[in-house]
Image: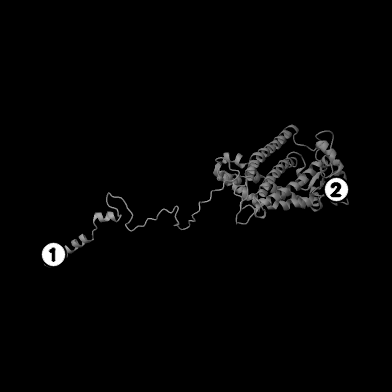
Amino acid sequence: MALAVVLASAPAAHAQQTLPDPDQIKSQGMATPGGSVRPPANAVNLPDTSGSSVRRPGETGRPAPAMTVPGNAVGNESVTESLWDRVRHGQRGAVVVPGAEQGVLIQSAGEEWRLIRNDQVVHYGGMLLLAVLTAIVLFYLIRGRIKIEGGRSGLVIPRFTLAQRIAHWFAATLFVLLALSGLIILFGKSVLLPVLGPTGFAVVASASMQGHNLFGPLFLPAVLAILVLFIKGNAPRAVDVSWLFKAGGLFGSHASAGKYNAGQKLWFLMTIILGVAISVSGFVLLFPDFIAERSQAQLANLAHGIAAVIFIAVGIGHAYIGSLGMEGAFEAMSTGTVDTNWAKEHHDIWYAEHKGQAMADTGRAEVEAGAAGDGVMHGVRP
């Protein structure tokens, strides 16, 4: 019993001994209910060091240097505004990353390129294409299809070889594919997006971009093949001046021409020049790692778009004349032969040089055209 009393009283006595007195807690700076926090009794307050030799770590005792204000800062203009002005105008900064443009945060020329492309190229390019289409429709309604005045003679003359026709249709197929996909890329946001909606237009635009990038590199070899196979006969001649003044017979009397008239020679020249320009600028856009600055890609993009729009506009006229617009013209590139009356009316000088090759057997004429075109046949030389 005595042992139980001792054990029960021991914790209470210990608690009374270890519990600090409230006044003692306050004197030591500890928090008490309703009281305030004071620093511990053993805390050391450092004296004011102003005018004293005692220094905190890092202090030198000298006043801090004043901030230098840029010389062009006026009034309340901040350093940030001056920095932003330099950044906005494309001033290069010092960076450790290698590259000609790594120190440029904002390329202001990019905004100029965007405005020229979206406002000028798209606007005037669209007007040009609409003008050409309108002119062709009006010409067809007023003039109609250009017929063979003497009717078909039943005799044909070989005109283009098989190699020439393959090169022509290969280039023409690429031209159509690249023209359609390119027009979607250039005008799709303005024309197709409101019709197809964002989802539908995204699919069409993505497919156009992929197809354009896939078939684009093939266009340069096609243009070079056209150059090699069709350069003969496309040299300028004195008769071409008369043909131009008469607009191919639209104004004045009949306009004489050799194998190619002046209009076809200009189209051949445009095909080579614009084809090479479009191909080279396209390669720059397709492989931008080989150029030094973004400005070169922007110039290539503008050159690509402008040259392509002009090429497409003139190509539409060429396609019209070679198919629906003129009777007998399409056969030259489909079978390689032309009717003698067609040749006499549109290429009289060339007909006079090759009329000895005329034959009624169209099958044989097509075979000979595939082999040598209007070259050496029946002992007749161009």
Q: How many numbered marks appear?
A: 2
User: Residue 134, can we see it?
Assistant: yes
Looking at the rendered image, the disc whose residue lies closer to the viewer, 1 or 2, is 1
Looking at the picture, tell me which residue is in the foreground, 49 or 189.
Answer: 49
- Disc ID at residue 30: none
Specify the amino acid type for callout 2: Gln
User: Could you say where residue 368 lies in the image, as x and y percent from the top left?
Assistant: 81, 52
How far apart are labels 1 and 2 at the CA level?
Answer: 143 Å
User: Could you say where residue 108 lies in the image, as x and y percent from the top left?
Assistant: 62, 45
Looking at the picture, tell me which residue is in the foreground, 306 or 223.
Answer: 306
- Disc ID at residue 5: 1
User: Could you say where residue 95 lies in the image, as x and y percent from the top left?
Assistant: 60, 54
- Figure coloring: one colour
Residue shown at 75% from the left, 43% from the top: 330
Query: Of helix, strand and loop, which one carries label 2?
Result: helix
Looking at the picture, tell me which residue is in the foreground, 304 or 100.
Answer: 100
Splitting the image into 4 quarters, where does residue 352 fall? top right
Q: Which residue is mark 2?
A: 357
First in residue order: circle 1 vs circle 2: 1
User: Residue 149, can we see it?
Assistant: no
Q: Residues within 10 Å of mark 2 (few under 14, many from 20)?
A: many
User: Could you say where residue 306 lies in the image, as x and y percent from the top left?
Assistant: 69, 43
Q: Residue furthest left?
A: 1
Q: Residues within 10 Å of mark 1 (few under 14, many from 20)?
A: few
Residue shown at 40% from the left, 54% from the top: 47
**Residue 160 in the figure: left or right of residue 4:** right
Specify the amino acid type for callout 1: Val
Q: Quadrant of the N terminus?
A: bottom left
| 130 versus 61 height, above or below | above
Residue shown at 63% from the left, 55% from the top: 99
